[in-house]
Image (spheres, grey):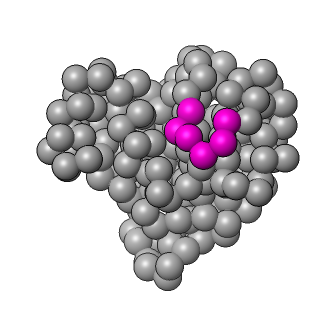
Amino acid sequence: MKKAAIFLADGFEDVEALATVDVLRRADVIVDLVNVEGCETVKTGRGITLVTDKRLNEVRFDELDALILPGGLGGYETLLKNEKIHKEVKRAYEEGKLIAAICAAPGVLGKIGILNGKKATIYPGMEKELDGAIYVKNEVTKDGNIITAPGMGKTIEFALAILEELEDASVAKEIAQSIVF
């Protein structure tokens, strides 16, 4: 069974995180909600308090097949400053694991230097954060083992792209049909 983690900090975009988790869990992908700030709970950008599955120091990165970074300005700003996230995302990228980021979060990938020469997208107006990337406007974009998406409106497509990489196209199509996408 495939395993992923989605890394959350106060202010993350509700839909980008939770809809992605929902789609992946429908296909029996194990997805841990991870609080990068070391607390048991995290508050979404819309003020909903969630209990997370793990804290950052409890994650077994060697067991993960995918690392997922949602957007939301508050969450993004925390991820942008978190050296542990930078180190682990970079290592996972180098090991060929799937890295997925949506909304503002592709800026983290730009900061750590893994977008050089790769096609990527980000929330409109934040293009300069994609250091070295070939910008693709407003589309879910896959290049190698990196998937990026521009914002909440593309979340289901983003989640299905992750699912297609973790499982296969037939599983992603089955889940898409089951949710009437």
Quarter of the figure that contains the N terminus: top left
Relative depth, front residue between 143 and 65: 143
Q: Is residue 137 visible?
A: yes
Relative depth, front residue between 88 and 157: 157
Q: Quadrant of residue 37?
A: bottom right
Residue 4 lies, in percent from the top left, at 42, 38
| Residue range highlighted in magenta | 136-141
Q: Is residue 35 visible?
A: no
Q: Report if residue 12 lies within the magenta region.
A: no
Residue 98 lies, in percent from the top left, at 51, 27
Residue 129 lies, in percent from the top left, at 81, 47
Q: Tell me: 44 left or right of 75.
A: left
Q: Is residue 150 above or below residue 161?
A: below
Q: Quadrant of residue 115?
A: top right
**Residue at image coords 61%, 53%:** 103
Q: Tell me: 2 left or right of 117.
A: left
Q: Tell me: 74 left or right of 116.
A: left
Instruction: Check the image and name the residue furthest to the front.
Output: 137
Relative depth, front residue between 160 and 41: 160
**Residue at image coords 47%, 32%:** 66
